[in-house]
Image (cartoon, coloured by chain):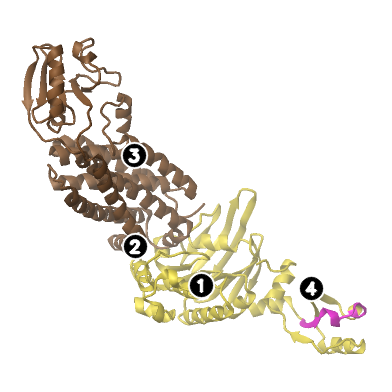
Chain colours: A brown, B yellow
Amino acid sequence: MMRRLFAVWHARNLEFLRDRATLIFTLLLPMMLVVGMGFVFGGPPRALFKVGVITPQIDKHSQPGPMGHPFLQERYVDFVPIASASDGLPKITHQQIDLLVDLHGTPRYWVNTDSPKGYIVEKLLLAASPGAQRQPVTGAAVRYVDWLFPGILGMNMMFSCLFGVGYVVLRYRKNGFLKRLHATPLTAFEFLTAQVLSRLCLILFVTTILYVGIGTIIHFHSSGNLLLLVLIAVLGCLSMIALGLTIAAAISSEELVGGLLNLLTWPMMLVSGIWFSLEGSPRWVQWGAHIFPLTHLLDAERAVMLDGAGLAQITPNLAYLAATTLVFLAFGAWSFRWRVE
Amino acid sequence: MGQPILEVRNLVKQYPNVNAVDGVSFAVPEGICFGLLGPNGAGKTTTIEIMEGILQQTSGEVRYRGELLGPRFREEAGILFQKTALQDFLTVRQTLSMFRNLYDRGLDIEEVIRLCALEKLAGRDNRKLSGGQQQRLLLAVALVNDPSILFLDEPTTGLDPQARRNFWDLIQSIKARRKTIILTTHYMDEAEILCDDIAIMDRGRIIARGGPRQLLQEHFEEVLLELPRHDFPDEARHLVTKVIESADRVEIATQDLETTLRALMDARVSLQNLRIRPPNLEDLFLELTGKELRT
């Protein structure tokens, strides 16, 4: 079994690596995006105050903080509900929010003493609630380009996983190559596993080049463990490759597969947090976004890269990615067709 | 005769509104080239794909060495489909190596390359092969596992005459290795040259079965006289009993050549462009199906 699997894996790798145009495009597009976005958005932070309000038992109808508090009536301030102080502290440390307040009981707040916007919005709070207890924290702001970097890596993985595998399987089926393989002792499981592993290796290879290349250009330093990042990338890619295989497992129409892949990629592009944080968006959007593997991949990546999170903090994301991989692969193998019906 | 290498029993394949294969049964002895002939739509590709284990039949069974098709058959069968693409950007040698590794046993890659005359093409990208070269590579792919039984589904369709003849030579050399070959074709000359045993299919059924010579002897006692149509006046029609007409020629079937020739000369029919030939499989096909070969 391993010999057959390796043979198909090796042949697919050769096919991809020798397709120079595709390979160059795969490498260049995300690199250009990051450098371009970093150039455009890498300047001083925009003048918008964002205040995290500790709101236990958040659900999709949650309003931030106790109703009617005078501070919450301030204009030009975006109030964002946050479940607990521990959830909010990394955000205030990285200046993703300008102030974190807990208005239950005696008001208290956390402010980043390195943040100019924190300094101003603190004045607004103290005007509305003079007795609030101050809890200072420090930490450099996360540049937009640093925040964007994991998003770009994730987006590149998503396209490569979904389209790379989906269209390849469809092409193999339509041109009769799958039918030819079916006439050999190769099993569907071996073929699918070889495709998954080949694509996984190629994506990890490309992502490593991008991580090192772009990281050097934008002077990015991950706060977390690199091996943990590899684990996230592996599980995230597996889940999305399996999703791509599921789409292409039985369909023989390029238009239909293209449509379905677009149907998947566009919502992920918009709500999985590639370009901007979903904080401040309606709760149902934030909840709905977590159905997509890419959201879990990006949440875990950013937690490790920006906040230095450990395995325990990202275990729920990893578990979701692993579970969806199994579900998608099982469905893909069940519905797999070797030939055009 | 010993146990057949392949046996088809009461094979039926139904699609909505059509019975593509309608109760076909036959057995193929080991070491022969068996031809499945018929026009397009006769059901021969459906039949061969069920025999290859690629397509599921509606009913009936196919047995390889007495067993239903299974892993052993996959290991020991070589298949050349009508249309197959191979992976882009791989060379001929890499393609063969990939397929060779899918089997537990087989031939050395260099031997397959030699056998199919691919020496000069071994390092060439699959995309840069001509039609005849691609077909030779696909034959080599079908041979990498040193198969006991080789399926060739219309292997020379689309090839130029030279490439067709080269391909026939290859198949003859494979036959010389005592391989069993199952060949479908709608070229009757190909079947006549390569096949030891043939079955003619039409509308999902086998309508004739036997060796090419045996079938011709069974169905024809005549020879055929071929004349340009303009040399055969209508008044001469009563002189002969069986005439097959086409757009530009007439064929006269006769059991008594001398009498027929004398009658034609007496009627002052020009024999300047006369050709006399024995019946061939194409004539047999027309005799049996009553229509031109559908290509």
Disc 4 to disc 1, C-alpha distance: 32 Å
Same-chain check, marks 3 and 4: no
Name the element at disc 4.
Answer: loop
Q: Which residue is mark 2?
A: A20
Label 3 vs label 2: CA separation? 26 Å
Q: Is residue A309 visible?
A: no
Drawn side of residue A268 relative to residue A90, left or right = right
In the displayed orientation, state which residue is furthest to the top. A68
Depth order, front residue of A255/A180 = A255
**Camera-side residue of A104 and B67:** A104
Q: Is residue A12 left or right of residue A250?
A: left
The crowding category of the residue bearing disc 1, from other C-alpha atoms within 10 Å (few below 14, some 14 to 19, many at least 20), is some
The answer to whether the residues at label 2 and label 1 have Cβ atoms under 8 Å apart is no
Left or right position of A53 against B148:
left
Given the image, on which type of amino acid does mark 1 rest? Gly
Residue at the disc numbered 3: A269
Q: Amino acid at mark 3?
A: Met
Residue corresponding to mark 1: B131
Q: Compute the Cα span from label 3 to label 4.
A: 66 Å
Report the amino acid beneath label 4.
Ala
Residue at 39% across / 50% down in the picture?
A: A166
> Which of label 3 and label 4 is nearer to you?
3
Q: Which residues are magenta?
A: B222-236
The residue carrying mark 4 is B247
Label 2 sits on what residue type?
A: Arg
Whether tag 1 and tag 3 are in contact, CB under 8 A, the answer is: no
Label 2 secondary element:
helix
Q: Residues within 10 Å of mark 2 (few under 14, many from 20)?
A: few
Q: Residue at x 52, y 78 (%)?
A: B167
The local crowd at label 3, few if under 14, some if 14 to 19, many if 20 or more residues have their Cα within 10 Å, is some
Label 1's element?
A: helix
Q: Chain of mark 2?
A: A
